[in-house]
Amino acid sequence: KAGVTQTPRYLIKTRGQQVTLSCSPISGHRSVSWYQQTPGQGLQFLFEYFSETQRNKGNFPGRFSGRQFSNSRSEMNVSTLELGDSALYLCASNRGEGYGYTFGSGTRLTVV
Amino acid sequence: QQQVKQSPQSLIVQKGGISIINCAYENTAFDYFPWYQQFPGKGPALLIAIRPDVSEKKEGRFTISFNKSAKQFSLHIMDSQPGDSATYFCAARNSGGYQKVTFGTGTKLQVIP
C-alpha cells in the first residue's frame, strides 16, 4: 500500500519567487492536511482539505494557499517567498474521524 | 488554549531504561491524543493514541498514561533501545475542529548503549 507521497523532496528558491508543493494521499483518504515544521516553531498547522473544500486554516498569511482535487491530491502554494518560509512542509492524510494522520516525508524548502 | 506543552525538550536514557515524556493541555474539548515518532529525514509516524475515557493504553513497549482531571498525558517507553532514538511529539485534536491537530514542541530522545 503506497504511503503519502510528496514532491519534490527538496527545493531551493529565491526570495520573491513562488512555489507549488504537491501531495498524493493514501488511496481512499479524503482528508489532507498541511503542516510547516521548523526547529524554532515545531509543527504548525497550515490548512486541511476534505472533498476539495478547505475545512480548517491555521494562522498563516494569505501568501500560503492550497487546494485539493477531485482525486484527493492536494497542492499548496506559497507566493512572494521570504527567508522565513524555509522549512520542512509536511502533508498528512487521514481516512476519517477517529484515525491518526499518515505523514509524507515532506518537502524541504530553502529560500535564499 | 490550543497549546500542548511538552517536556523535556531532550532526553538521554541508557539502553534498557525507561523513557518518560510528559505533555499538558488546556483545552478540555480535545478528545484524541496521539503520539508521533519522527526520525531524521522522515515525516512523523503515528506511534500510539488514546482517548480521554481511558487512563492507560499499552502497545508493546510503549504506554500512554492519561490523567483527565490534571489535563496531562505521558508516554513511557519501556526497555528503551538505541533504535528508539528519535524525536517524539505529543498531540491533541478537537473533533469539533475536524482534523486540525495541535502538536507539542517535541522531545529529542537519545538512547545510549
Image: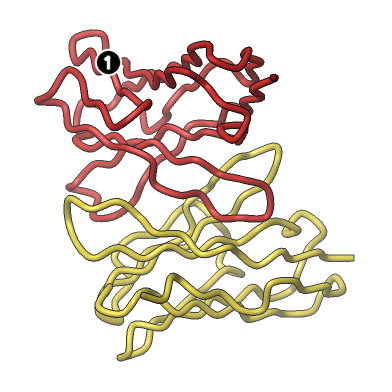
Chain colours: A yellow, B red
Give the residue drawn at x 38%, y 82%.
A68
Query: Residue farthest to the left?
Result: B53
Q: Is residue A13 left or right of residue B106?
A: right
The N terminus of chain B lies in quadrant: top left
Tell me where residue A94 sits by quadrant. bottom left
**Up-down relation of residue B99 to residue A10 (above or below):** above
Q: Is residue A40 left or right of residue B109?
A: right
Count residues near mark 1 (Cα–Cα under 10 Å), then give few for <14, some for 14-19, many for 20+. some
**Up-down relation of residue A80 to residue B99 (above or below):** below
**Up-down relation of residue A58 to residue B14 (above or below):** below
Residue B60 lies, in percent from the top left, at 32, 30
**Up-down relation of residue A36 to residue A18 (above or below):** above
Host chain of mark 1 = B
Q: Is residue B51 left or right of residue A101?
A: left
Give the residue drawn at x 28%, y 17%.
B65
Tell me where residue A69 sits by quadrant. bottom left
What is the three-letter code of the residue carrying label 1?
Lys
Give the residue drawn at x 56%, y 44%.
B38
Q: Is residue B10 left or right of residue A97?
A: right
Tell me where residue A7 sits by quadrant. bottom right
Residue A38 lies, in percent from the top left, at 67, 46
Give the residue drawn at x 18%, y 10%.
B69
Residue B67 lies, in percent from the top left, at 23, 13
| Label 1 sits on residue | B71
